[in-house]
Amino acid sequence: MKILLMIILLVGTSGQLPLLANNAMGGSTDTTNQWISGHQLQEQKKFLLAILEYNRLLHQFPTYSSKNLVYLRIAQCYDSIGQPAQAQRYYEEALHATPQADPLVQWLMLLNAKNRILQGKFAPALTELYSLDTLNLGEEMVDLYHILAAVALHHLGSSDQCKHHLSQLDVDQEHLKKYDRSISASQRPNPNSAMIMSAILPGAGQLYAGSKQEALNSFAINAFFLAVTLRTAQFVRVFDVVVAVLPWFQRYYVGGYNRASVLAFQKQMKKRDASLNNVLKEIPKNRMPPDYFRASKLNPNSMN
């Protein structure tokens, strides 16, 4: 996934959430000191040490009244070091430890959805988003909800529903039409067509997929082994030729047309990513997370 999309998904997700997470209430002086220690390490970007400190607090004080906020802080630390799967585990722990009436629940569900998207789990992310009580979301939460839903739906192939959420973010119709056209263009090159073309003429599918170098390599290698096979057949039995050449045939001919299909699919995905990034750029700045969120944005980590 491209940098723009990663920044959108990885910025701090609310102005209210850090405030909630900074104010763990209750407990003894010892628990307060450990909380402050973990928080200070987190602020210094010593995330692994902060995780250790928070876990020590949980271990030593299992009945700590603000346990849900400790889980949340651990999740934020894992987010900051680019481990969304671990982060999700602790966001879910925080969710289970938070009373359903607490407004933090809505944020935690958004964060769960975000982390599922970062792991490429788009369907579960959408399920999480559609479980939210959207009528009672704050303005900033609504905007994040629409961004995450648009991203998940795009990757699930529901471009019309994706556009619906983008329109809720005040993306104008002209840019939505451009998104439509780019989605249509992303259907080419077709992986099946690329495979068939390379099966007929080695290298043709790779050329169709836009890889001239791989097309040349495939054509040259297959032509070489075909020439060697025909030449060898003049001097030995056909059976011997088949036994000697079949492994090479499987590797370069069969592998070649499978590779052509993969290249075409990768080209499609690259176009689809570009189409989404281009339309996300058109979300008005007042509908994007404000600059003070970016001060605590998480580190981008690659999503494939």
Image: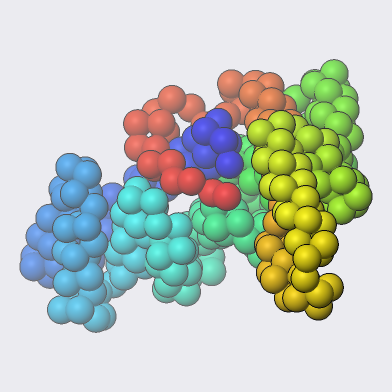
Q: Is residue 183 left or right of residue 262?
A: right
Quarter-wise, where is residue 83 in the image? bottom left
Report x, y in % for residue 249: 74, 63
Q: Nearer the viewer, residue 37 or 65?
A: 37
Q: Is residue 213 above or below residue 56?
A: above
Report x, y in % for residue 186: 82, 36
Report x, y in % for residue 70: 30, 64
Residue at 69 percent across and 71 percent down: it is: 244
Residue at 87 percent across and 53 percent down: it is: 199
Q: Nearer the viewer, residue 298 or 248?
A: 248
Q: Nearer the viewer, residue 136 or 41?
A: 41
- Residue 215: tell me if it is visible: yes
Quarter-wise, where is residue 30 in the image? bottom left
Q: Is residue 184 left or right of residue 132?
A: right
- Residue 32: tell me if it is visible: no
Q: Is residue 43 left or right of residue 213?
A: left
Residue at 39 percent across and 42 percent down: it is: 298
Q: Which quadrant is home to the N terminus? A: top right
